[in-house]
Amino acid sequence: ANVSHPGRRGAASNVPHRRLGHARAGPPAAASAMAAAACQGRHASMLHAWRDDGHSGQLPAVPLPGRSVGRRSTGHNARSASPRCRVAGGEPAAVVSGNSDVSFGPDLELSVSGTNATIHVFGIDHRNANPHVGEFILRMRPEVVAVETAVTREHGAFPGNSLGCGDPVVEGTPDAFFVRMFCQIAAHLSEHGGADLAASELWAQITSHYRGEQLAYIAAFATGARLTFADRPKDISYRRLFAIASAADLDIGFASQVEGAYRESLGLPPPPYPGLDMPVAERIMFQERDAIICKVLDDLCRGSLAQGGPASPASSVVLVVGRSHLDGLRFLWAEQRWQGLVGAAALSDSQLMSVPQPPKEDVASRGAGVRRGLLHAMMRQMVTQEVMADMANVLGPVPQPQLQAVDAIEEIYTCNRMMLAALPPELLKEVVAGFNCDFEDVLAPYRDIRAVNGGCVYSEEIVTQLRSLNFELAPPEAAGAA
């Protein structure tokens, strides 16, 4: 049998995909050996739990990526400066093409009805340097750069909050240090970068030490653009997910993330965007946030932000988000579908910003541990260890009575067999090829215990079986001595 395994998608995966976030792939050769041994009824020592490969977020040095066509995972031509889609407010998307000397253009361009504003949308892999985004900002000099990730805690306290280098920050905090550092770098670049900041040797040096949104921050500050937080505060998303999603909802979300990662690994297109029928967990983690981003963008371009920001309507905006948001933004912006989700003239009045009470259940009940364990299992497919730690800080540590369930679910839901069991049959056939065996029989117990199938989610029998597959043989010389 032969099995291919992708990395977890999200911000720290070797196979970046939709998200907040990603992890290391199990080697295909190891996975193939595991499947072969399972089909032949033998034990295999090839069972690997993916481990998060997330970066520390403390400004690591990142090599400047090559500029060859195909380096960018979206398939965008390295010489194309035109967006792959142009979406007008209230109009369907239309594919456009064009060439320019700018290395990379935006993935989407959005127009706002009744205004002359243009929103240039970049979908990035949060792990990578993405210097093209900063270069675009340096050359286009937009009035506003909107971001998914806030610079400071105060900046990310509410959608639409704006930040500039002259704004006060809370002194004595890591946030203040980073803001001051970004502003100093930006000022040095602006003063010494020459006529074309993006082509300067100084910018090349900066791109070798900073990545993604950090480069967008520096470019925005260097050109005098206001930096606007466009997303929902992450703590609200964590709390809404934990309060609203059932165990089955979280299990479906887990399977969806795994399926997307396998599809990308095999070079297959993602499933069609589900529109307004998106499953509960992904609706909370993606579509609700996309609707809020659309609302902030619309307010920016109409000059109607409730809090501080650009004093007049912005006519040129660059939006930097994880590429997992592109399909949602494209769908919701067309025909202004986001308005129905936001459901209020002001975000402060929107139910998308509310935090419902979580279900009342005994903290020691099996169901409570199952929901927390499945929440962790789904989120691990999407985010880095830093985000997992942030979520734990918001929700609180796992209560002692739930630890057994959470640990068991982690062990089961990070194994290759559960991930394969979560795939739809037609995709599983693309991943697993067998000779004189049927891998369906191997996966059946894992499929049966899934919450979405009415199963128990974890059991001592399954955990024991997994542990029996992961052993090491003694070295030959040690075995001979015995």
Image (tube, grey):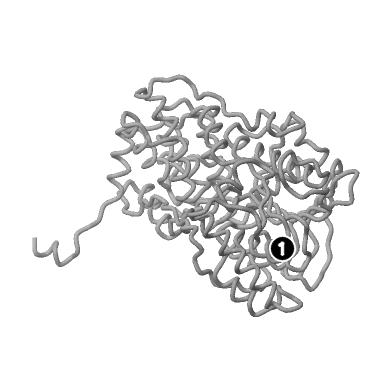
Task: Report the front residue among 450 and 333.
Answer: 333
Q: Is residue 362 left or right of residue 181?
A: left
Q: Can residue 5 be seen at all in this image of the molecule? A: no
Q: Is residue 265 above or below residue 413?
A: below
Q: Which is nearer the eye, 33 or 125?
A: 125
Residue at (34% x, 24% y) in the render: 364
Which quarter of the picture shows residue 329?
A: top right
12 relative to 244, above or below: below
Quadrant location of the C terminus? bottom left
Which kind of residue does numbered mark 1 sit on?
Answer: His
Q: Residue at x 43, y 27 (%)?
A: 455
Q: Is residue 21 at least partly visible in the picture?
A: yes
Decide if residue 11 is on the left or right side of residue 72: left
Q: Residues within 10 Å of mark 1 (few under 14, many from 20)?
A: some
Q: Position of residue 310 (x, y in %)?
A: 76, 50
- The image position of residue 468, as x and y in percent, is 27, 45
- Residue 304 location (% of width, % of height): 80, 41
Q: Percent x, y for residue 114?
A: 91, 44
Counting the numbered discs, the total is: 1
Above/below status of 99 relative to 158:
below
Q: Nearer the viewer, residue 186 or 451?
A: 186
Give the camera-side residue of 292 and 452.
292
- Left or right relative to 223: residue 435: left
Dot 1: element: loop
Residue at point 61%, 58% (across, down): 213
- The residue carrying mark 1 is 76
